Amino acid sequence: MIRAVEFKGPDRVPIQHGVLPAAYDNLGEGLRRLLERFPGDLGPSGFVGPSGPQGSTYNAGTFTDEFGCVWENLRQGIHAMPKGHPLAHLDRLDTYRFPDLSPGDWSKVNETVASHEKYVMGGGGNLFERMQWLRGYEALMVDFATREKRIYELRDRLLQCLLPPILKWCETEVQGLGFGDDWGTQAALMTSPEFWDHFFRPAYERLFAPCKKAGKHVHFHSDGWVWDIIGPLRDIGCDVVNVQQSLMGVQRIAKEFGGTVCFRTDLDRQGILPFGTPQQVREHVREVLEALMPFNGGVIAHGEIGADVPLANAEAMCEAFVEFGMY
């Protein structure tokens, strides 16, 4: 993993599995046996978070998280939708109290990292998405369009909420921190690139800075058409980006960014993984890896196994990671 991220000539492409809870419900023991045959290269951290609200955004029903955001879920194992926004009215910002995200049992992190030979990541949190969940998506978009002054205050107070656990992770021996914000629609960024650069680039720089100072890799996940921010994320310290290469074109991505930032692949989970044949999955993996491998590293094999992915396709993906992932 380290050699792949740092372009230092790994012997093979490392694997980082992504499995939604509903996939285990659908595929059961067959999926568990498959992942035992093809273990990933990401290990546990040993961190135990504090007791918080009972439930999960993956549980059917209604759930209120530590920020006071209310989630509704119609199906077990699929991520919920935010329906209740504590800052739906910005005047509530005066009295709103952000949660303390840093408590927990950090004592076994270094011991756990040292006990196995796998790469370990801490969590950096969500910035843009958390602003949506607090404010409401439509209201937030209007705030951006009108340059609502208080939205800057919301951003900065949220940054102060997210930074303490990042600093805690940076004091441990984990190799990287993972951040995530889905920035794209199917065809474009959700804001103009100019606004992103003005409003969000300096915020992400503040979140990434302690990671870079501590020598940690920065990983960033973002769904959708996010072409306009791949370069800026790289330029402010992002080491690994997980974007939908099949949406924007893996050959185009390799030509523009190959060798300058590491890509965690995101195989086509809208088409090929759930609806293709195992042979189509195999050929898709080969195309993606062959495009991104010729840079002495710079690629991590990953494909999300969701509730709609057949076990045969998941197996074909894992087998192809091994077959086509040798340098």
Image: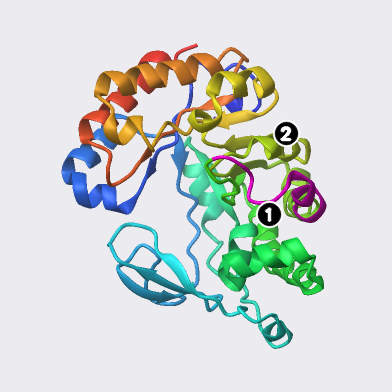
| Kind of residue sitting beneath label 2 | Gly
Depth check, mark 1 against mark 2: the one in front is: 2
Residue 208 falls left or right of residue 57: right
Residue at 54% x, 23% y: name it. Answer: 250
| SS under mark 1 | loop
Residue named by callout 2: 231
Across and down, in percent, residue 274 comes to 29, 36
| SS under mark 2 | helix
Above or below 191: residue 64:
below
Q: CA distance from mark 1 to mark 2?
A: 28 Å
Q: Decide: marks 1, 2 in contact (CB < 8 A)?
A: no
Residue 204 falls left or right of residue 66: right
| Kind of residue sitting beneath label 1 | Glu
Query: Where does the magenta region start and end?
Result: 187-200
Residue named by callout 1: 171
Q: Report crowding for label 1: few under 14, some 14 to 19, many 20 or more residues within 10 A (C-alpha).
A: some
Residue at 33% x, 23% y: name it. Answer: 281
The quadrant of the picture occupied by the N terminus is top right
Q: Report crowding for label 2: few under 14, some 14 to 19, many 20 or more residues within 10 A (C-alpha).
A: some
Residue 293 falls left or right of residue 201: left
Residue at 75% x, 70% y: name it. Answer: 151
